Structure formats: C-alpha cells, structure tokens
Image (cartoon, grey):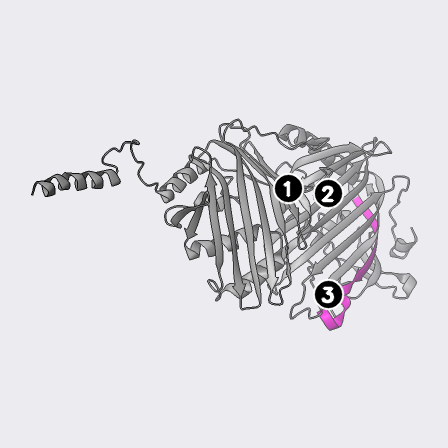
Amino acid sequence: MKKNFLFVPFLIGMLLTSCGGATSPSGPVEPPVDRKQQFNTARKNTAEAIQYEYDFNLTAKIKFKNAVSFSPATYSGTTYVNTGNSETQFLQRRNISGLLVIDSTNYIYNVGTDLIKISADEDKDFSVINHETVSSIYDFDKNNFGYILKTLNDNHCLSAQYSGGKYILSLHTNFSQDSILSVLNFIDSKTIIKALNEYTKSQWGVGLKVNTWATLTSDNTKLHKFHFDAAITIKDAFEIGFEYEQTYKKYSGVTITLPTFENTDTNRSSVETKLANILNTVVTNKVASTSYYNYDVKTTVDHGVSKTNPLGLAVNSRTQGYTKRQIVDNTVYFNNRLLVDSDYKNSDQYGDLVKDYDSYRAKLNDTNKTVYDVLDPKVGFNQYKELSEYAEESVDEYYMLPNNAIFTYDNIKVVKKTTDNSGNDVYKFGLSTNTVKYLLREYNKSFRMDFNRVTVFDIYKINSDFVAKKALFTVTVSQENKLVSLKIDLKGFYTETDSGDQVKYRLEVSIDYDWTKSYTAVSKKEDIDNN
C-alpha cells in the first residue's frame, strides 16, 4: 500500500508536467503554438500597418486540353503605402506584359484627393491616364492585387498548418472562386474575361485547385510573404487561373517618391495655366478672320467573331479632306472638302447602309447664308442639297476641332510640354477614361456616312465595360500662338449597345494647319468647288 501511495503523486506530477503545469529540470515547457491565431495576428498587423512596402508578381495562365499553354498577362511591381503622410499615401508601379495585353509600365498614386493612373513606355512617355477623386476611407491595397490578403479572416481561413517554415492555409471554396474572378478582372484581356464569364456560370467548383501559403517575419509579428495560386477547369476544354505572390520589404521608413516625367506637370495650378493657354489658342484660331487646315480621321470597330460579323472582320472608316474658313461680321463661312471611305458599305456584312462619296459642305456669303452639301460635280453628280436646319454650334461648323469644354482640369490632370525642332510648343495631355468616351461620342457626330442623311449611323455605340487602353492627345502651337497641328489616338474596349458584343475600338484624328493660305467665302453654289 505504501508503494501505491508513493506512486500516485508521481503520476500526478508527470501529468502536470506534460500540460505545462509543473517544471522539469530543463525549465518550463512552452504550450503548443496556435498557428491559425499566429497567422491571423500577423496578417492583421500587416493589413493595419501605417506604412509598408512589398513587391508583387501576378501571372495569368491558360492551359488547353491539348496541353498547349500560354501566359496572357504578367503583372509585377512594387507597392508603397504610408498613411502617416496626408499628402502622398500610395504608389504602385506595375510592369505589364503578355500576349493579350499592351506592354507598358503603370504608375498609380494619389496626390491629395486625386488618384492618378499613368501608363508609360520605357522612356517614361505616358500614353494614357485615368484619375478619380479618392475618398478619405479609400483602401488603396484592397483596391489592388493585395486585396486577397486584406480580406482574409476567420471566415475564410479554415486552418493554418505549419510545415517547412510555411503556414499552409485552407480557404473556403467560394472565397477562392471569387478571388480568381476578381483578380483575373485586373488583367488586361477582355477575351479571357468574356470566355470565363460564359463558361463558368454553371461550372464553378469543377476542377478547382487552390494553393495558399504564407511566411512570417523573424519575430512572427507580421507577414513576410503571401502566396496564392488557383486554377479552374472549364468544361474539360481548358484550365484558367493565376499565380500571385507578394513579398514585404519594409514596415517603417517607407518614403514615397512620385514618378517623374520630364517636362510634365500634375500640379493643379500649373496644369490649369497650360490648359488656359491651349484653350486661348483654340478659341483664337476659331475666330481668326481666315484659316485653312487639312484633316484625316480614321475609325476602327472590331467585333471579333460574332453572329453579325461571322468572319471577324474589323470595320474601318476614313473621313478626310480640308476646311477653309472666313469670318465676316461674326459669321463663319466655310468650304469643306469631304472624302468618305468606309467598310460599312460592305453589304454582305453590314447591309447596304453607306456609300463612299466625295463631297463639299459650304456656307455661302449670300443673303440667306445658305449651307449646301454638294456631291463632287467632277464625278458627274452635280447634286446640291440645301440644309435648311443647320445648327451654328454643331461640330460640322469647325470640322473635327474638339469642343472647348474638354480643356479643363476635370478632364486633363497631366500636361507634358516640350519644344519641337521648329521651335513650336508641343503639349501632350493625359486624359481620363470618361474624357476618352466623350471624345468618341463627339466624333460620332462628325462621321457623315450617309450623304442623303436618311440613316443615322453611329460608329461608336458605347454601352458599358468601357476601357481606355491608349489615349494620345497632342497639340502643337507656333511661336505666333497659332495651332500647327492636333493629333488624337484612342483605343480600347467597350460593350456595344445593340449587339452586346465586346468590341475593340480605335480613333485616329489628325489636323494640320496651313496659315499661308487664305479663303474668301463664295456667294454662288456653283463656285463651291472652284475656290
């Protein structure tokens, strides 16, 4: 009995020691680590950090059933956040490349309440800008690739197993699926997104593969690396997915230096001053006693392969000519040469809506200030069509010149000013997405496809999902403060109103002035083509 009595305290001591309730000769035994809690604490500390800097890499991938695979897009770069600085909180530099995207470097940053996005080439010559007003609660990281990490919580992370120095995470299926689609929407290929939406409506969860893991800093308080890759098989035809990884470099001492573009202003006061100079030049040219300029407008709308376009051919149209103008007693008289060459005349594709033609439009200096559309008499038509309801403020009056209202800071927040070899000032503008859309709709008014004006024909029928991938707008001004040229080049994607097709668009406008020529308004319609 004594032996048994002595053995019981020994057993109790052993049990207490194994639960951490007693000491051993080697010291206290640490309780087991709750890896899930440790990861979530580090994730929260990271997501709520005042400042941080991380590199990221995102690669989209498609693998077809025949094992052919390719990468439609790769995004890589660095994100900087410093919420302790009220003037500049965020900067992200993205390098973009791939088969189905336009290679470029994107800079996204905020100055005050303006969020600026610039796409630039290797020489830091920007080609498109988008901007919006940022609210005081704007979450920069969540609105970029890092949003997956920011939105993870106990409802999404079911477990965190520790193996080989990594925290292997298990996520809800729905969260993984939503993450795939959301991240792919960041990628610049509408072909991928359209295919994904069509094929996955009833296929989510089929063949879904997810691999997520993270590592922590040496003190286990913040994240060092976060990895997330996922893929989904679509109807056994192809697999689509992505691989994303971000590596944290700093949690303190993060300084944000905005990208510099030589001769470029983003300061509101500087931009508005330059825009005022341009607006003054445009207005001065419009009220010049006499002027002459050539113009060339090219349009492209590509539906891809669709029911209305079975061969997948793009529609290309071209309007070119010249405008001669004279102002007498505040009345603008003009003589415009117009040549229309359009693929919309292909009746097998688009119906017999349009005829190519060569014509003039002119306002006579007669008693009634009559405006005529005239088919070229030289080709035998000799047809004069009087326009009884001609709007003085219409876009036709100035033929292709943009509306004065565009030259405001709301539309243009970046201006680059340089000088060409002739000593002319060259202004290059950064346009918002809404401004690009506005320009397309404005120039819709300029495409006079139907000479008899029976058919109203808009080339750009913009419904939704509008994307501006390229937006070049350049104005050249002489030392005498006269317009030398105006160039516009726009391209991107949108969903069409009528068909619902996702179309690719392009608009190229070129206007060149010749101030050595003058014009005297004619008073007889028979003289329209002779002056």
Question: Eyeballing the image, is 113 above or below 385?
Answer: above
Say which amino acid is labelled 3: Leu
Residue where numbered disc 1 is placed: 106
Of the residues under marks 3 and 1, which one precedes in the sequence?
A: 1
Residue 368: tell me if it is visible: no
Residue at 81% over, 58% down: 373
- Residue 349 is covered by the magenta coloring: yes
Of the residues under marks 2 and 3, which one precedes in the sequence?
A: 3
- Quadrant containing the N terminus is top left
- Give x and y (percent) for residue 241: 55, 56
Q: Viewer-proximal residue, 328 or 368?
A: 328
Say which amino acid is labelled 2: Phe
Q: Secondary structure at mark 1?
A: strand
Packing grade of label 3 (10 A; few <14, some 14-19, many >=20) is some
Cα distance in 3D space between marks 3 and 1: 31 Å
Cα distance in 3D space between marks 2 and 1: 18 Å
Residue 175 badge: none
- Give x and y (percent) for residue 492: 67, 52
Horizontal side of residue 461 vs 87, given as left or right: right
